[in-house]
Amino acid sequence: MEETARLGWVVPVSVAVVAGTSLMLGQWAILAINRVGRWRTLLTLAISGLGMLLTGVIEALLVALCGWMLLGRSLRVAVLLPSVLIAFAPYWLGFLVLLPYSGPGIARALKVWHLLILWALLRPVLDASATGALAVAATAWLATQVLGLLADRPPIRLRERVFRLVSDSAGWTGRDLMESAAMGQTR
Amino acid sequence: MIGQVLIIVVIGLVAAGLVAPGEALMWWRSGRLDERLIHWPSLEEAFGRPGEESGDPIPADLPAEQDHYLVYLSGIGISSPAELPVIEIPMVERLTDRIGDTRVIWQIYPYSAANTALTQGRRLSRLWQVLARWKFEKTRLRWMAFLINLRNSFQIFVSSDRRYGPVFNLAIAEQIAAALIRNGYRPEHRHPVTLLGWSGGAQIAAGTAWYLAALGMPVRVMSMAGIMSSDPGLDRACQIWHLRGDHDKVQSLGALFSAGRWPIFRGSSWNRARREGRLRVIRIGPLKHAGKRGYFSCEPILPDSRQPCETTADAIVGVLVEAGLARDNARPDNPD
């Protein structure tokens, strides 16, 4: 019984870890711009996988909170977490974000796809109507996005700090490259 | 059967797209971290060749300095910095003859961060050699030469992408700076430079303008039926001219797919340049993008009894003369 329960976590956790790694692979440009070495690249990819797990835990917490607030249901995070983690499956295609020009659009589409799967998976878990499950899923998803945005803004800059630490790089982006080319320099 | 072919085509396109930024990113990774981002190359650097190849000998005398430099960036049909697509050669020769006080530079392959010809020094160069040959042969597989255009068009996406563009455009800007030095440009004199981009070359012109302006030169961008995005490089261009034919639907793709060119995004580089009067869209006549009545074609004769290619050349020269950058050698009332 315990073995079955343990194995039950393998699939959702693997889905989330692979999703995080694939999404980071899609953002390979940032690794290349910072000239991150091979081992640091592998480490960054692995940490991104774990980062997705953490995001899943936060989203599950928010789903529990929204479920309680909107539907009056009180569910344990451990019950919700497998569904939330499996809903990260679309991010397996995160490597497609690498595609030039269309990549950022694909990233947005994957986010919406994740929301749709979350909605579908939460319905039986919450034992709610389609509308109720959608309200919970969408609110939790939106709250996760907002939290992510806030964490990326100064002074927190969480993702940037973690990236710098793990990749041992300056965390430069294309924008930094352009800004460093000041006007009118000559030699 | 059609479904299977479609799947293979989509997978092929996705694979091509995934590898497209690779060259620019590998070029960037190969550099040194402490290097300055953009600088005028030394003569040795300007005459150097990519990779392990030995550079060209530095001539005892460089070409005489000119008051204006026109850098021609070819369309997606090009496969080597040493050779323009056949259809474009007469136009570049015509411009070279006609535009006075100006040096025309075309020896740049704007779709390779390392300035490496598709047909040399690459893992797939034999394939590209065959495809480049088929372009001019009457073979059933001639259509496959389109892969060169496809490969280059992915580089346009790389140039216009906010993640890869800064790296790719930096690489091409360095090539342009080297080409200017090889052609007698003296950085301290800061003579004006106009980047003339044909079709996809216009996007590269817009992207590189950012870095070339950083070198201190006054940069202007002339898009000849350009398929271009609202690139931040436009912010640093003194002037931008977008020349287009009345019947050219291909150049409209840039306006359609680049959200920054939609009027609702008032703060975009394109719309800001338009508001500030730096950007002008100039209709040059009843021309199409390619084929008969295309910008490079000699037929049919247009209602004003000019050839389409004459109309194009007249428009380019006219804009440069009007801006006070060059003389028109073909005008009888030329002051010289």
Image: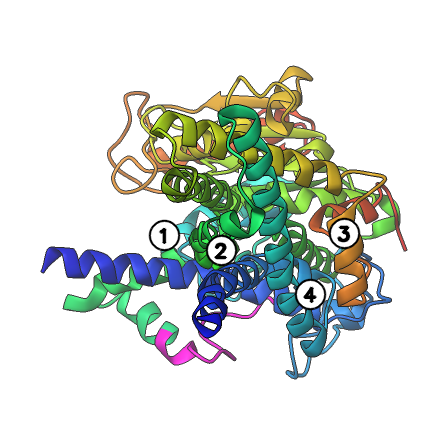
Q: Which residues are magenta?
A: B113-127
Q: Residue at x 40, y 34 (%)?
A: B253
**Residue B39: x percent and y percent?**
82, 57
Q: Quadrant of the C terminus of chain B?
A: top right
Marks 3 and 4, Cα distance to the nearest angstrom? 21 Å
The reply to whether discs 2 and 1 touch (Cβ–Cβ < 8 Å) is no
Q: Amino acid at mark 3?
A: Glu
The answer to whether tags 4 and 2 share a subunit is: no
Q: Which residue appears at 26% of the width and 59% of the height?
A: B9
How far apart marks 4 and 1 lie (CA) works out to 33 Å
- Prevailing SS of the magenta stretch: loop
Q: Nearer the viewer, mark 4 or mark 2?
A: 2
Q: What kind of element bears circle 3?
A: helix
Tell me which chain the residue with mark 1 is part of.
B
- Say whether residue B125 is magenta: yes
Q: Which residue is mark 1?
A: B87
Residue B151 position (above or below residue A125): below
A158 over B241 or under it: above or below: below
Can you identify the residue that label 3 sits on? A160
Q: Residue furthest left?
A: B1
